[in-house]
Structure formats: C-alpha cells, structure tokens
Image: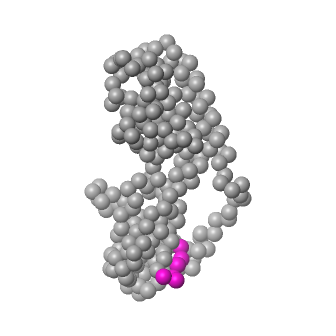
C-alpha cells in the first residue's frame, strides 16, 4: 500500500480541478480541507475498527513518582492495555474501578504499597492534560517499565512532505478536498462530487467492517469484573 505525501495529494487535486494557475483557493485552505478530510476518515475508523491505529509506547518509572504523561498522539485517551515489566516480573495493570475508588487508592498507598500496580487517568490541569496515575507510586526506577498499548491519532498535515497515514482511504481524502473546493467556488459539479464522496465513504466503511487481522472474530467474554474483585 502506497503512502501519499501531502504534496502528491495537493498536486492530484489541483490537476484534476485545473487549479494550478488559480489563487481563489489558497494553499492554506487546501491544507485545512485535507486535515478536515483526515478528521472525517479518522472518526469512521475509530468508530468501526479502532485497532487500525493501535500502537505502543514505553514509560519509564521513577521512584516515588505517581503521575506520568500519556503519549502525545493518543486518541481520546483510549488505552487498550498496560503491561508492567521489570526483569522477570511482568503483569497487566488493571484500572482502579471500585465505586469507592478514592478510598481504595489511599488505602493501597498506606497499607499495600508492595502490591501489584494499578492505574487511573486524571486531568489535573489544562497545561498537564490527562495523565496516568500509578497506584501505588513507583517503588523503583524502571526503564521502559510500562508498555502502553493505545489508539493514536491519524497523522495531521502541516507541510508538503507530511504523509497521509491512511493509505487505503486516500481517495476519500482527495474527494473530500475536491468537494470543499467546489463548495467555495459554487461549482455546478457539487452534487456529483458529493455523490462520489458518499460512495467512497461507504466503501471505506465496508472495508473497515471486514478488517479482522487474523480471521478470529469470536467475541471474548468480559471477565474484568472478576479481575477487579481480586483486589
């Protein structure tokens, strides 16, 4: 699957719409339309097959530190799983879920500081954003101690060399841009362009609906409430 740069996307739109010698739609507007199209595609992807954007990051643990920044490209703070690893010790972190979670966090720090780590997400300030709070605080420095599997944002375009990282649906992005240009121009081809965009959207939805990585589509039982009771 080929990844298109923004320069290639822009060139395709300009040639198809004969915009090379025209300045009615400026470059900044085209880039804005492109990012709007990516937002639209991203929304469909996360709704239907969110693991399309599944990725991983590592977080270093620091002794006595309990709050850690999430990856900057995380989408809507969606974490799929967190693993703790320190030498041969390895396990999945569970989120603190009790209705009296705040008392649970305090009692864990006070009476069970050597227990398995858990976590919650907190939003202390606009400057810090959403952060991961480790329960209890880290007991030791551990490089790459947390392996965070999360859903990332699609790549946003800020320069000609930037890559559109949804290659299967780049033609949806291109058609979306064309429709926005037609809308600004009041072009009579708007209706036809909208129809084609809807066709590409439906194709995208159908493709995403069929995206099962290994053919294993058995629904797993949700046993998380049993796991929570272990604590």
Q: Quadrant of residue 167?
A: top right
Q: Nearer the viewer, residue 112 or 99?
A: 112
Screen quadrant of the N terminus: top right
Q: Residue at x 46, y 19 (%)?
A: 17
Residue range in magenta is 87-92
For residue 86, above or below residue 153: below
Q: Horizontally, is 81 left or right of 223 in the view?
A: left
Expressed as whole percent of the image width and height from the top left, the position of residue 140 reads: 37, 82
Residue lying furthest top in this view? 188
For residue 188, above or below residue 87: above
Q: Residue at x 56, y 50 (%)?
A: 52
For residue 132, above or below residue 171: below
Q: Horizontally, is 149 left or right of 139 in the view?
A: right
Q: Main secondary structure of the magenta part?
A: strand
Q: Nearer the viewer, residue 127 or 172?
A: 172
The reply to whether residue 189 is visible in this rendering is yes
Residue lying furthest left in this view? 127
Residue 212 lies in magenta, yes or no?
Answer: no
Q: Residue at x 54, y 18 (%)?
A: 191
Q: Quadrant of residue 123?
A: bottom left
Residue 88 lies in magenta, yes or no?
Answer: yes
Expressed as whole percent of the image width and height from the top left, the position of residue 108 reads: 42, 81
Expressed as whole percent of the image width and height from the top left, the position of residue 36 reads: 43, 35
Q: Residue at x 43, y 74 (%)?
A: 145
For residue 26, above or below residue 160: above
């Amino acid at each position: 699957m080929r990844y298109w740069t923004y320069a290639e996307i822009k060139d395709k739109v300009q040639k198809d719409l004969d915009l090379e010698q025209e300045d009615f739609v400026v470059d900044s507007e085209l880039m804005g339309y492109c990012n709007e199209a990516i937002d639209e595609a991203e929304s469909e992807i996360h709704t239907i097959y969110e693991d399309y954007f599944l990725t991983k990051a590592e977080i270093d643990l620091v002794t006595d530190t309990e709050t850690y920044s999430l990856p900057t490209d995380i989408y809507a703070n969606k974490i799929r799983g967190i693993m703790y690893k320190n030498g041969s010790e390895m396990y999945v972190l569970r989120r603190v879920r009790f209705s009296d979670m705040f008392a649970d966090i305090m009692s864990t720090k006070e009476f069970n500081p050597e227990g398995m780590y858990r976590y919650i997400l907190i939003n202390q300030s606009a400057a810090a954003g959403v952060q991961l709070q480790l329960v209890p605080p880290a007991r030791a420095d551990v490089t790459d101690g947390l392996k965070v599997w999360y859903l990332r944002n699609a790549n946003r375009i800020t320069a000609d060399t930037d890559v559109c990282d949804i290659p299967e649906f780049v033609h949806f992005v291109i058609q979306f841009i064309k429709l926005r240009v037609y809308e600004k121009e009041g072009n009579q081809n708007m209706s036809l362009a909208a129809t084609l965009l809807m066709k590409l959207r439906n194709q995208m939805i159908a493709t995403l609906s069929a995206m099962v990585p290994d053919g294993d589509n058995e629904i797993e039982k949700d046993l998380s409430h049993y796991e929570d009771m272990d604590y």
